[in-house]
Amino acid sequence: MQIKQTTLALLILILVTSTSCSRNKVLPVHEQCSKDIEQVSQLLKQKSKSYNKTETNRIQNLVTAAKIQQQHERFNVCVDKMNRALTLMNADAISIQGTKQN
């Protein structure tokens, strides 16, 4: 009887662990690259007038560089460049809010 309970508990633990892992799916890096390029491009189109020209050019250059890395199948570099672009966009948005409050 003790073995059956232990086996049942082990099966339940395995089942719970496997279902929780399947919920946290991570996109393959090539899909993440494409998704990030699309996201940054759309955000830039929507908010380009609120960014200063220097930051807009930096972000556009990062998008262009990411597309080149994507063509050469260097997807990790592509994702990194898009993360940098998103960081620049957030930093610029914060600085714009700071100047409006002053």
Image (cartoon, helix red, strand yellow):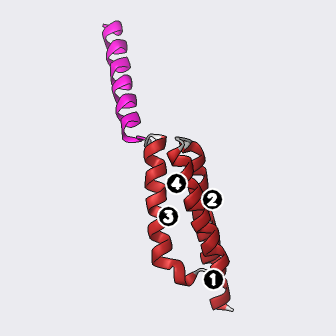
Q: Is residue 41 left or right of residue 51?
A: left
- At 33% from the left edge and 24% from the top edge, which residue is drawn? 12
- In what quadrant of the picture does the N terminus appear? top left
Where in the figure is residue 21, as x and y percent of width and height? Answer: 41, 34
* Secondary structure category for the residue under label 2: helix
Q: Amino acid at mark 1?
A: Ile
Give neighbour class at mark 1: few <14, some 14-19, many 20+ (Cα, 10 Å): some
Nearer-N-terminus badge (4/2): 4
In this view, 82 is above or below 89: above
In this view, 77 is above or below 91: above
The label on residue 84 is 2
Where in the figure is residue 17, as x and y percent of width and height? Answer: 40, 29
- In what quadrant of the picture does the C terminus appear? bottom right
- Of badges 3 and 4, the one in the foreground is 4
Does the CB distance between marks 1 and 3 fall below 8 Å?
Answer: no
Per the image, the residue denoted by label 4 is 67
Q: Amino acid at mark 4?
A: Lys
